[in-house]
Image: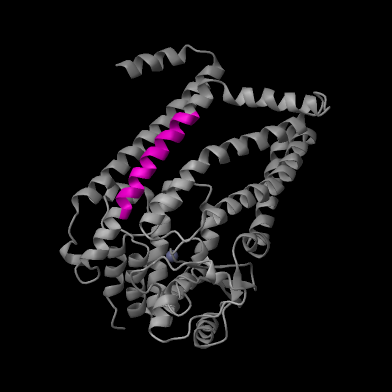
Amino acid sequence: MGMWASLDAMWEMPAEKRIFGAVLLFSWTVYLWETFLAQRQRRIYKTTTHVPPELGQIMDSETFEKSRLYQLDKSTFSFWSGLYSEIEGTLILLFGGIPYLWRLSGRFCGYAGFGPEYEITQSLVFLLLATLFSALTGLPWSLYNTFVIEEKHGFNQQTLGFFMKDAVKKFIVTQCILLPVSSLLLYIIKIGGDYFFIYAWLFTLVVSLVLVTIYADYIAPLFDKFTPLPEGKLKQEIEVMAKSIDFPLTKVYVVEGSKRSSHSNAYFYGFFKNKRIVLFDTLLEEYSVLNKDILEESGMEPRKDGEGDSEEIKAKVKNKKQGCKNEEVLAVLGHELGHWKLGHTVKNIIISQVLSFCLTVLSRRFEFQADAFAKKLGKAKDLYSALIKLNKDNLGFPVSDWLFSMWHYSHPPLLERLQALENSKQD
Ligand SMILES: [Zn+2]
């Protein structure tokens, strides 16, 4: 009843207030819906305390319990951080935080000797202050997530010094891109006349294409170390596989993901005839710094690190060896290359304009297709075991609420992927 009465009241307000109310109402509706879904998924983590029988073959009860506790902690964290940011956003809107920041920026410009004719300068100061505010309010949450939650579950590899340096670097790099780009954009809007929105749209399109092009070569290396994968069996096999499907591979890199966390991954990037593959060192059993201690015990040679950086990294993962065997790495890459061969990347860019829910549904279809592609390359058996290992290394929880999973998961649940692979694992 109360809600309908307030909707009626909303209708009688002037236009700006109506828009203001609609924004708040929309934001809270989405927030409450997602909180409802998260609570459903949380119930699954709480009540599924034993490995379901159909998973008995692929997951031991120790890993299952570890992943269950990890996911429970993560879900508690996102409940509180989500509540905080929803309330923060609402308060900023209600108490006029945005106009306040605008006036503050004007005052700064006044001190610096810029008159009111320099609206663009005022906009830049406004942007700078707004991003600074959001970085500062986000910092405690990010610190807690890294040094309490990820640390507790054995994923964090960062020192506080590395984290802070990284955060400052990220802020500076963002400003170096954001400020010139937005001043140009504002200038275009100012002189663009009636069709300013077309020029503005074209400009943002060009800027995002440029950013995508330079990101991997010029921006990502500012944050992480990329080294070419050394010559050897793995590199040869990757090249053979790429060639067999006409993938224009030019370089294979290993990124030192282990400096941040022990979560593992692989991806490719680049345009047209110049594609590169990046493997996280944590994905590679033979290469992972995190396995150093285990390798030493077993008398194998650990990987050499020219700059001695690895001393900084204490192998915090004490439990078991992490990462995949070469054949499994190749199977994972077979899946990734499937995304390329089947045109998923381009399709994703084209439909990224559409609602994110449709994207999630489509993205899951793509995952199955890429798995099937790897299967066609004869990698079914290795992909099967790689998926299980990766799920284990990343403490993914194999059971999920169907509604939560449908809304959020861009990758299909592990069990469904394994079943699809299983059907013809023997080929
Ligand atoms: Zn995929």
Which quarter is ligand 1 in?
A: bottom left
Q: Residue lying furthest left in this view?
A: 53
Question: Does 352 lie within the magenta span?
Answer: no
The x and y percentages for residue 412 are: 34, 60
Is 204 on the left-hand or right-hand side of 90?
right
Can residue 325 be seen from the camera position used here?
A: no
Magenta residues span 70-89
Question: Does 87 lie within the magenta span?
Answer: yes
- For the point 28% across and 64% down, which residue is it? 416
Can residue 339 be seen from the camera position used here?
A: yes
- For the point 34% across and 72% down, which residue is it? 320
Quadrant for the C terminus in the image: bottom left
> How many discs mark residues in the rendered view?
0
Q: Nearer the viewer, residue 307 or 89?
A: 307
Quadrant for the N terminus in the image: top left
The x and y percentages for residue 363 are: 43, 58
